[in-house]
Image: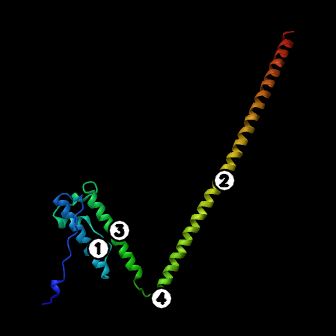
Amino acid sequence: MFELDNFLTSPQAPEAPEWANSETKRALYRHVCAEFERIKSRIESGENLAIKERKIVARTIARESGVHDSLLNKRRQPDIHELITQNNKELDKLWNHLEATKYKTSKKPSKAKIEDELREARAEIERLTNLRLSEALTSAIELQMTDSQRALVATVEHLKAEVERLQVRNGELSKQLRNMMMAVDNIKSK
């Protein structure tokens, strides 16, 4: 008698890799594979899944396997962690591929939405303009400071030369004053 059940075979559990050498690692491996297949089938069926629902979460695997969450960190189980990372990348690729191929009807934006976008664009333009103005003002101040610093250096040099000249002149006048005082003293003594 022909029955479909005679021809259907249940999917075999994936064969554990070499690194799954303990019962805990094999259980974790099987649960990761089962979770991968479950999420993959949900994605392929076209369900609208949240980001957390379309990724394998280590905490869920640990709970299903009956181990503590801390066992599934990168340091303790690097192979399981790498398997979860690779499977999540595959699931992400599958999700992105199916999302890209979905037909999406475009809807004409409403006036309110266009006004909001315009307001946001104007605010961004104003922010960028203010940013450019502040950069230009800062640059001008730096240039002005440089010019004023040069002017101050030139003034200081000029004043130093003037002080030196006045010191020489003061020395000459002091010499003349002494000579005059000596002449006055000589006249008084005669």
Residue occupied by mark 2: 143
Mark 3 vs mark 4: give the one in front. Answer: 3
Q: Position of residue 121 (x, y in %)?
A: 53, 76
Residue occupied by mark 4: 108
Name which of mark 1 and mark 3 comes first in the sequence.
1
| Residue 37 occupies quadrant | bottom left
Q: Considering only vertical position in the picture, is 39 above or below 142? A: below
Could you tell me if the residues under marks 4 and 2 are in contact, i.e. CB atoms within 8 Å?
Answer: no
Separation of disc 1 and disc 2 at Cα?
57 Å
Q: Amino acid at mark 2?
A: Leu
Horizontally, residue 176 falls left or right of residue 122, namely: right
User: Which residue sits furthest bottom?
Assistant: 1
Q: Who is closer to the viewer here, 116 or 63?
A: 63
Q: Residue at x 67, y 49 (%)?
A: 146
User: Which residue sits furthest front?
Assistant: 1
Horizontally, residue 176 falls left or right of residue 45, namely: right
Q: Position of residue 131 (x, y in %)?
A: 57, 64
Tell me the tag on residue 89: 3
**Quadrant location, the N terminus:** bottom left
Mark 1 vs mark 3: give the one in front. Answer: 3
Q: Amino acid at mark 4?
A: Lys
Q: Judge the density around disc 4: few (<14), some (14-19), many (≥20) Cα neighbours within 10 Å.
A: few
Residue occupied by mark 1: 53
Q: Who is closer to the viewer here, 167 or 71?
A: 71
**Which element carries disc 2, helix, strand or loop?**
helix
Could you tell me if the residues under marks 1 and 3 are in contact, i.e. CB atoms within 8 Å?
Answer: no
Q: Position of residue 6 (x, y in %)?
A: 15, 84
